[in-house]
Image (cartoon, helix red, strand yellow):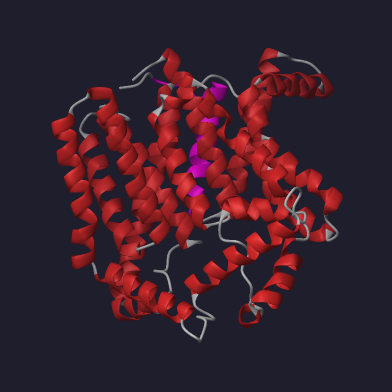
Amino acid sequence: MLTKIHWKEPGFWASFAAVLLVVSMPFSPFLLSVGMWCLVAVALWSTYLQQPSGIVSLLRFSWERFVQNKVLLALSFLFWVPLVSMGWSDDLASWLTRVRIRLPFLILPWAFANLPALRLRQLAAPIYGSLLVMVVLSAGVLVNFGLEPDLILNGLKEGQPVPVPRHHIRFSLIMVVTILSTGWLSLQHDYWSSRAERRWVVLGILFLVVTLHILTVRSALVAFYAGLFFTLIRYWWKTRNWKLGLLALSVLLLVPVITVSTVESVRNRIAYMRYDWEQFRSAKGGANYSDAERFVSLEVGIRIWMEQPWLGVGVGDLELENQRMTDRIHPEYSETPKLPHNQFIYILASTGLFGLIISGLAWMYPLFFFKYRKNYLFMSFQVVVFISFLVEYTLETSIGAAFCLFYQLWWIKMAEAQEDYPL
């Protein structure tokens, strides 16, 4: 059991703010914002306890601490890159909207640079909080599924998702991270208040795994199995237990096969994928089919980037250029064109090779440090996010940015804490 914490400490309130942020992420944008600003307030309070002075001196001191933390400073370049693209964006209203979505990449790294050191019990609280809220929300989703199974299953055949709070892809990705992180805590024999609760944690994890397969969000399922495969490779590397590793790999390969043959929602989703692909390749072109629209968005994004390979068209002008290029090469999709459904292509089209190189280095900079690479939660999260980046412009929505940024920062904090308090 981890050491007790005291409510008068800034660390307690930092953990509380993180719990609020995590549990609200799947369903409440308002509480999500409240959680972020609570972290900012705790950072200011913690800084004041170390440097009691006027507001100007306090802000200067906190900024100096932020600049000295190279890892957190690097993450802030995911805000600075779209900001400077104002220089080659004509649509300033759209530019401002995109920059506002990326603003947390400046504010939260600054806040984390000024948060106090957190103990593992404080760092584990959001993980358990996420498990609790995802189990409750998933139970509601399955009850709703049970009330109208035929309607939802037929919707899957037509490319419609299973109804969930807010966005089905983000909801499922949060579920994946929750499964991997609580599973890791369980394997560390960790618990919140008593050993007896571990059996409930395991049951909660299994319930989320089943729900994840019923939801059949493809990118989340790929991210989940990629995370499990990374876990297996990491286990092999650390233990050299090849026999158990091969057994686990066999089970890992069998589960998707069993799922396809037994879960109707998965079969319906696969049937839709096949039909969508056939329509896309046919003379009809697959217009108004979700997968076909994604394929077209990738082609359009690459064409836009090829016209301005070094700096892109600017984040403010991407929507206009996307409409122009879609009208030109795929007029059948011009009514509601999608932005590039790939984070890398999105960055290339909006800020060119300049943006991709700077943004890529900013995100991957922690990987240059061994203390982060050896942390399982940090590394498994990189696998999940990479899969998401391949099929979505994850950082360009408020919940997507919050999801990526918060967990990246929290696992960095946990990796730093584990140097002093290894599990």
Q: Position of residue 16 (x, y in %)?
A: 51, 34
Foreground residue among 210 and 29: 210
Dividing the picture into quarters, in which one does residue 313 lie? bottom right
Rendered position, 199 above or below 142: above
Which residue corresponds to the image point at 31% horizontal and 74% vertical from the top-left? 268
Going 78% across and 24% down the picture, which residue do you hit?
59
Q: Is residue 397 visible?
A: no
Q: Bounds of the magenta span? A: 4-26
- Residue depicted at 64% across the width and 73% down the height: 337
Pick the front one: 381 or 195: 381
Q: Does the magenta segment cover residue 8?
A: yes
Of residues 214 and 221, the one drawn nearer to the viewer in this rendering: 221
* Position above or below: 246 against 423: below
Q: Is residue 263 left or right of residue 157?
A: left
Asked if residue 267 is positioned above or below residue 308 in the image, the reply reads below
Please report the residue visible at 36 percent of the width from the left and 74 percent of the height from the top. 274
Q: Main secondary structure of the magenta part?
A: helix
- In this view, which residue lies farthest toward the bottom? 284
Q: Quadrant of residue 258?
A: bottom left
Which quadrant: the C terminus?
A: top left
Q: Percent x, y for residue 148? A: 32, 77
Residue 371 falls inside the magenta stretch: no
Q: How many marks?
A: 0
**In this image, 160 relative to 262: left or right?**
right
The answer to whether 333 is drawn above or below residue 195 in the figure is below
Quadrant that contains the N terminus: top left
Is residue 237 found left or right of 116 in the rendered image?
left
Residue 156 spot, x, y in % from top left: 37, 74
